[in-house]
């Protein structure tokens, strides 16, 4: 089973994002254009932020780290 992982400050605080429960999403602000990559829970819609996206390089790093091919953008 493929799992998405997020590492917090301490290694023991690893949180897993199973793809059948979570969808990778980029949240983009309409006003400022700030973009944040993370995972949205499919059932309750809760969004877990993972990283700030400042450039295409950051987006490519997110895709590579979490093995994501396509990401939907939400405004």
Image (cartoon, rainbow, N blue to C red):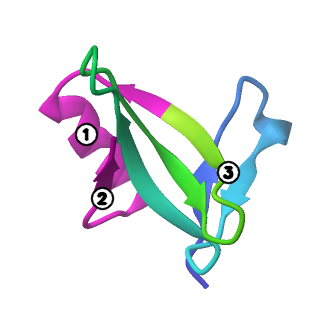
Judge whether 73 appears above or below 23 on screen.
Answer: above
Q: Earlier in the sequence, mark 2 or mark 1?
A: 1
Judge whether 2 appears above or below 10 on screen.
Answer: below
Q: Which mark is residue 71?
A: 2
Tag 1, which secondary structure? Answer: helix
Please state the extent of the stretch shown in magenta in the rendering: 51-75
Q: Name the residue under label 3.
A: 46
Q: Do the residues labelled 2 and 1 touch (CB within 8 Å)?
A: yes
Judge whether 53 appears above or below 71 on screen.
Answer: above
Q: Are marks 1 and 3 in contact (CB under 8 Å)?
A: no
Tag 3, which secondary structure? Answer: loop
What is the distance, in whole Å, between disc 1 and disc 3 at their CAs?
A: 21 Å
Q: Residue 9 carries which label?
A: none
Location of residue 32 (image quadrant): top left
**Is 31 on the left-hand or right-hand side of 57?**
right
Give neighbour class at mark 1: few <14, some 14-19, many 20+ (Cα, 10 Å): some
Please state the horizontal and vertical placement of residue 52, each as a whole percent of the image: 40, 25
What is the distance, in whole Å, between disc 2 and disc 1 at their CAs?
A: 10 Å
């Amino acid at each position: 089973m493929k799992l998405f992982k997020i590492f917090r400050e301490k290694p023991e605080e690893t949180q897993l994002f199973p793809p059948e429960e979570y969808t990778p999403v980029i949240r983009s602000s309409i006003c400022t254009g700030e973009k944040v990559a993370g995972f949205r829970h499919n059932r309750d819609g809760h969004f877990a932020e993972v990283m700030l996206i400042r450039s295409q390089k950051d987006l490519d790093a997110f895709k590579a780290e979490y093995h994501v091919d396509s990401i939907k953008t939400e405004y």
